Image: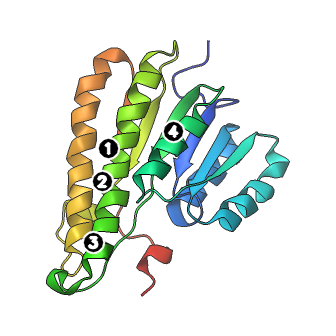
Amino acid sequence: MPSPMEFRSRWVLVTGASSGLGREIARTLARDHGANLLLAARRTERIEALAQELADTGVSIVPITADLSRAEDVERLYAEATDGREVYGVVLNAGVTCFGPHHELPWEDVAALLATNVTSTVRLATLFLPHFLKQQDRGGMLLITSLAGIVPVPYQAAYSGSKGFLINFGRCLWHELRPEGVSVTTFVPGGISTELLDI
């Protein structure tokens, strides 16, 4: 039986896989760990290009176009990811931000941020945890948060607040699921130079 963190030939979903940290995590999972990948992002051409880039690794790769600010896309992503396969790992990385004085930001932008960063993460966790509990080798999830969830970041109030929520959400899930053998890891990186910071 594989060890708990053995990803070779197992399916791993990575959200926000079209750029930045999500893309690098996907590359590492394929190249260094031999994981089969479900690549989810809004930009179809980006995840298809990544799938092509990683074709020489010999792993199976399924790109899934999904806008996680849309509830129907979140439900469809879960359905497509689990259709005929056991998903061993989920990297919940998708995230967006808004820059500026909070009260001046268009509400549509703030609502999309909360839907992407918070609601989709909670919903996917809610869907995948029973999936893991039914599997003999359990598996688990990685929540990508941010140091902005601990240290307030003025002019990114909604983003900072969303990441603070995810940090505590992930920690609570860790306590709840540890006795069940399901891994929940919360990653809290500092600043990373990605497209998210392009203004």
How would you rate the neighbour count of disc 2 (Cα within 10 Å): few for under 14, some for 14-19, many for 20 or more? many
Amino acid type indicated by mark 2: Val
Q: Quadrant of the N terminus?
A: top right
Contact? badges 3 and 1 (CB < 8 Å): no
Q: Is residue 5 left or right of residue 97?
A: right
Front residue of 167 and 94: 94
Alpha-carbon span between mark 3 and mark 2: 11 Å
Contact? badges 1 and 4 (CB < 8 Å): no
Which circle marks residue 122 in the picture?
Answer: 1
**Looking at the image, can residue 48 be seen?**
yes
Amino acid type indicated by mark 3: Val
Which circle marks residue 78 in the picture?
Answer: 4
Contact? badges 2 and 1 (CB < 8 Å): yes
Give the mark nearest the N terminus, 3 or 2.
3
Give the mark nearest the N terminus, 3 or 1.
3
Instruction: Name, please, the residue furthest toward the front.
Output: 72
Give the mark nearest the N terminus, 1 or 4.
4
Give the mark nearest the N terminus, 3 or 4.
4
Which circle marks residue 110 in the picture?
Answer: 3
Helix, strand or loop at mark 3: helix
Alpha-carbon span between mark 2 and mark 4: 16 Å
Amino acid type indicated by mark 1: Val
How would you rate the neighbour count of disc 1 (Cα within 10 Å): few for under 14, some for 14-19, many for 20 or more? some
Q: Is residue 21 above or below residue 57?
A: below
